Amino acid sequence: MTEAPQKKSDLPVRLASAIVMVAIAGTALWLGGWFWYGFVALVAGGCLFELGRLVRAAFGTGTKPTLMVLAGAAYIGLAGFSLANLPPAVLLGVIAVVIATDVGAYFSGRAIGGPKIAPKISPSKTWAGLIGGMILAGIVSASFFLYNVGEIRFSAMVGIAATIGAVLAVVAQCGDFLESWLKRKAGMKDSSNLIPGHGGVFDRVDGLLPVAIAALPLWAMHP
């Protein structure tokens, strides 16, 4: 009997795409100023286009879809404004927390498994994964605080920083669920096929958007 050909792993493609994305984003952030503003605007525009595509596929045209797209524009616009105005050190911390959420959720979810959070929206998301993401995000947030402050004596503040990171992990997961809900309604696996191995822009920043919105007032309130 002839064996069915095995599906080729897309890991090399995903890795290459990730390296290119990090290089482009990192260069724009390093150059700063209008280079960073332009990059954020480009990402926000691509994200809004893909969100509109999902909404149209899920709900067609009319008043309700139009209002949803307008709400999406406000949502993405607020996130873009925050990303454009956060200090670079804080911005790196925000991105690190979102990445830590994804990494912690992935590994703890795979290792522990268990009950799903919302199987009808995102079948792969488990409570164990969420808790793992919260723990790692809290550690990363506390580590960034210690690095920036340079002293460990602010033990209470370290705890607050860890708590903020854990809460932001939940916020990031909410952003992920929002896009997953839209994709399920639209019957689409990815928001687009723009990024090889990764899907679309919205797929890459779904968790970052709400965290960015939350991060700006948190930064403004810091002592």
Image (cartoon, rainbow, N blue to C red):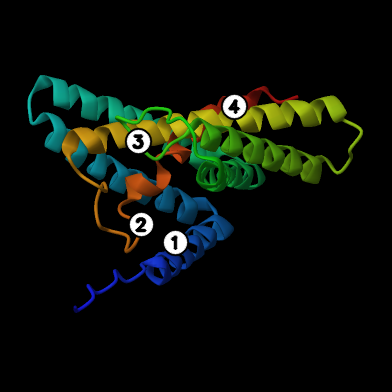
Mark 4 and mark 2: Cα distance apart in space: 26 Å
Residue on which disc 1 sits: 21
Side of 174 where 7 appears, left or right? left
The secondary structure type at the circle numbered 4 is helix
Q: Amino acid type of disc 1?
A: Met
Label 3 to label 2, Cα distance in Å?
17 Å
Residue positioned most to the bottom: 2
- State the residue lying farthest toward the right: 153
Label annotation for residue 158: none
* Residue 215 in sight from this viewpoint: no
The alpha-carbon separation of the residues under discs 1 and 3 comes to: 25 Å
Compare residues 108 and 93 and report the one nearer the observer: 108
Place of residue 72 in the rendered image (x, y in percent of width and height, measured from the top left)? 29, 30
Residue that badge 2 annotates: 198
Q: Residue at x 31, y 54 (%)?
A: 199
Front position among marks 1 and 3 = 3
Residue 216, located in which quarter of the rendered image?
A: top right
Mark 2, secondary structure of its residue: loop
Q: Is residue 21 left or right of residue 139?
A: left
Q: Cα distance, mark 2 to mark 1?
A: 11 Å
Indicate the quadrant containing the C terminus: top left, top right, bottom left or bottom right: top right
The answer to which of 200 and 109 lies nearer the viewer is: 109
Q: Nearer the viewer, mark 3 or mark 4?
A: 3
Give the quadrant of the N terminus. Answer: bottom left
